[in-house]
Amino acid sequence: MIIGIPKEIKNNENRVSMTPAGVFALCKAGHQVYVETMAGTGSGFNDDEYKEAGAIICSCDEVFAKADLIVKVKEYLESEYKYLREDQMIFTYLHIANDQPFAQALIDSKTTAIAYETVELNHNLPLLTPMSEVAGRMAVQIGANMLQKANGGSGLLLGGVPGVMPAKVVVIGGGKVGLNAAKIACGLGASVRVFDINAERMAYIDDISNGVIHTIYNNEYNLRQALKTADLVIGAVLIPGAKAPKLVTEDMVKTMKEGSAIVDVAIDQGGCIETCDHITTHDDPVFIKHGVLHYSVANMPGAVPRTSTIALSNATLPYILKLADKGIEALKEDAGFMKGLNTYKGYFTCKPVAQALNGKYKEVEELL
């Protein structure tokens, strides 16, 4: 099979979908890999490294024209829709529940689209996990920076100092993003509360943190009370494939302290905080609403591309090898992998995505 690795064009997206090590593994398995020139530069991988690994370096048009399988990091932007075609598979973070134009382009082109974020393994999301870990840890770094007075924040040091209370951090969601955010915030000395509805998950967080991270059952009353005194709020809610629920409403944000900060990590799925009503970029990441700083960048890990690229490539490579070896048959042999299939033959094949977009859904078994 011919695998294509294009250069990402989203704002400040410096990740690349495959490292030279991944290219080497695919070439050794008998496949051809076309890499767009300078695709890996932002992550610290140059064209010569890819050539040495066995790749063919070429233009963007050649990558999309020659490949049977396109492997990306982020969704296609409008200028890339022209490359979509029925006889090609794409494997990337799709997040189409919050992207109607791209979803429609996939349906119209009848492209076989497989989403990293809905592939399952033992009830976990193995291809979302590495970027969730990065984003969760970054959220605290970003939030701590936002709280600095020069950046418009309240002027608090996240961990405080002896004799001065630390900042209060509220994390909404105790999954991979939330737990990683809580661990970093706790490590910096902040007072951390994690809101969730899964009693087993809360017990796990309490256990591994020896009770230092406080867990609270997430209902509207509890969350409202916590937001009034919160200095940093991190939105970390995920429903696989679906739009994130708006758990923090605008009137709740109005009760927050002036100069406090919000980082909505769920923004790529529509966001879980109502006032994060638009996606921002790494060029212009923060806006202020009701006196509260808001950060809603949809590709947070793109700011640390070296770490993110290696972590992502490590996770995706086994799946890419399966696709390269067996094509769509690889999905038939693995029910968890099959859950990654979002569009096929002009239909949505992931129910949460179809419901979010009011699109035409078909069970994948009917189409294969």
Image (tube, rainbow, N blue to C red):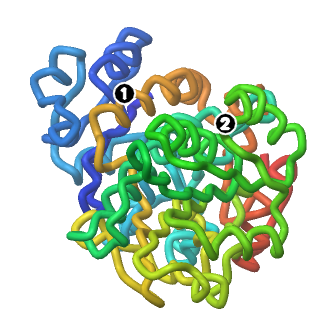
Task: Give the residue displayed 45% in from the left and 69% down from the top.
Answer: 261
**Mark 1 to mark 2 CA distance (whole Å):** 31 Å
Above-or-below relation of 264 to 13: below
Q: Between 338 and 295, which is closer to the camera in this rendering?
A: 295
For disc 2, the marked residue is: 212
- Residue 215, how many percent across, how many down? 76, 47
Location of the N terminus by quadrant is top left
Left or right: residue 256 versus residue 241 is: left
- Residue 8, how many percent across, how many down? 29, 52
For disc 1, the marked residue is: 310
Left or right: residue 328 versus residue 163 is: right
Question: Which image quadrant for residue 203?
Answer: top right
Q: Answer with mark 1 or mark 2, whichever residue precedes in sequence.
A: 2
Above-or-below relation of 4 to 83: above
Secondary structure beneath dot 2 equals loop
Task: Find residue 362 and name its label.
Answer: none
Task: Give the residue displayed 37% in from the left and 41% down from the top.
Answer: 67
Above-or-below relation of 237 to 41: below
Left or right: residue 257 versus residue 327 is: left
Question: Which image quadrant for residue 279?
Answer: bottom left
Amino acid, disc 2 = Val
